[in-house]
Amino acid sequence: MQTVVSTPIELLDRSEELSRMMLQSELYQAFTDARRAMNEDEEAQTLIHTFNQEKERFEEVQRFGKYHPDYHEVTKALRLAKREMDVCELVANYRKTERELEKLLTGISELLAYSVSPSIKIPSSNPYFDSSSCSGGCGSGGSCSCS
């Protein structure tokens, strides 16, 4: 049975209740545990720091593209740093729980929005993990029927 919220105060109370439920969920606890473990691990932090440094180098070189003399070297170093960071168990676990939490939050957002109107567009931060997103952006006339 679907209940209708009749006042703004009731809406605020329900949203606070939903927020508390999310913060007490197993998924949120797993996410915060994974984030804490990754942030406290020296090796993971070193890999993240190295990746960020290589990313900055790449962004500097990217302005000139493949014509920059260090383009191939910097690109390779960035890919290697990303791979090393991605295979770190703590980083991988953090990213996995982050995606799961994001998927849950997107699902909740969709439920709330579609309860108001089925034509509401839900913004998606990651079209690869969100099957309901409009891959071409609104106005593309794509599979989401935007125009």
Image (spheres, helix red, strand yellow):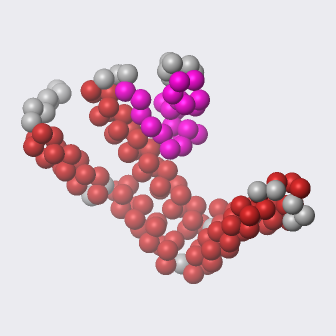
Residue at 53%, 61% (x, y): give it. Answer: 93
Image side of residue 10 versus residue 77, left or right: left
Q: For residue 58: magenta? A: no
Q: Is residue 48 above or below residue 7?
A: below
The quadrant where residue 108 appears: top left
**Residue 107 location, quadrant:** top left
Left or right of residue 23: residue 140:
right
Q: Could you say which is closer to the camera, residue 14 or residue 12?
A: 12
**Which residue occupies the extreme front position in the image?**
64
Question: Does residue 34 lie above or below 112 as drawn?
Answer: below
**Depth check: 111 or 124 in front?**
124
Report if residue 138 is visible in the image: yes
Residue 124 locus on image (x, y percent): 48, 39
Q: Does the magenta run of residues contain 122?
A: yes
**Is residue 66 left or right of 133 when viewed as pictured?**
right
Instruction: From the viewer's side, name the closer residue of 42 and 68.
Output: 68
Query: In the rendered image, is residue 87 in sight?
Result: no
- Please name the residue shown 78% across and 62% down the image: 61
- Residue 62 position, x and y percent, is 77, 57
Instruction: Provide residue 83's location: percent of width, then percent of height.
Output: 71, 62
Is residue 100 shown above or below 95? above
Query: Residue 3 vs residue 36: left or right?
Result: left
Looking at the rendering, the stretch of residues picked out in magenta corresponds to 120-140
The correct choice, above or below, for 135 with respect to 21 in the image is: above
The quadrant of the picture occupied by the N terminus is: top left
Q: Residue at x 53, y 24 (%)?
A: 139
Q: Residue at 48% of width from left, 30% of height from top?
A: 132
Q: What secondary structure is the stretch in magenta mostly built from?
A: loop
